[in-house]
Image: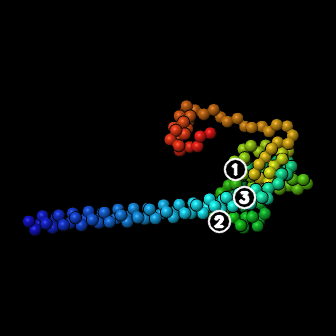
Amino acid sequence: MNINRAGTALLEVNMSKGMIIFIIVLVVMIAAIIVLYFLGKRAQKKQAEQKEQMEAYKQTVSMLIIDKKRMRIKESGLPQAVIDQTPKYLRRTKLPIVKAKVGPQMMNLICDENIFDEVPVKKEVKATVSGIYITGVKGLHGKTEVKETKKKGFLKNAIEKLQEKTGAKPIK
């Protein structure tokens, strides 16, 4: 009988240790989620302030787009002050860079990711610029060519429809 009592005592200790570990992991996970929630709110506020600032300083400029590429910030030809202000973890990422002739000057500008594909090459456009950041583009002479999207396969269409139904992907 002593052996049975010792065996059941060991099981109770092991279950309680497992339960304690589970509770600790659960508390750590909840704390991480709370921290990420508040960091996300702070990042959203910063982004809204930056957007307001860009809207305040934006101006419309006529420019000739010479070239556009996705390049690392060190290879982009941007001013050294811009490169120095960029956080170290973002220096290896590729940015949408547009080389344009604004008046008599050749400039390298950073383009908004959303409109990068719409920017025509070797065309004159009216662009909305805020500092060295292009936020909008309208064709000045002639029509701007919009690239046709490739036809998607059956499997890709089915996956997109499922994602839209479940809410994983925003509806177009």
**Residue lying furthest right:** 104
Q: Secondary structure at mark 2?
A: helix
Circle number at residue 88: 2
- The x, y position of residue 8, in whole percent, is 17, 64
Q: Residues within 10 Å of mark 1 (few under 14, many from 20)?
A: few
- Amino acid identity at mark 2: Lys
Q: Quadrant of residue 107?
A: bottom right
Circle number at residue 52: 3
For marks 2 and 1, give the one nearer the viewer.
1
- First of labels 2, 1 by sequence position: 2
Quadrant into which the C terminus falls: top right
Tell me how the rendering is colored.
rainbow
Identity of the residue drawn at 78% across and 37% down: 145
Identity of the residue drawn at 72% across and 51% down: 112
For marks 1 and 3, give the one nearer the viewer.
3
- The x, y position of residue 170, in whole percent, is 58, 43
Q: Secondary structure at mark 1?
A: loop
Circle number at residue 113: 1
Tell me, yes or no, if residue 132 can be seen here: no
- Callout 2–callout 1 Cβ contact below 8 Å: no
Q: Residues within 10 Å of mark 3 (few under 14, many from 20)?
A: few
- First of labels 2, 3 by sequence position: 3
- Amino acid identity at mark 1: Glu
Circle number at residue 136: none
- The x, y position of residue 118, in whole percent, is 74, 43
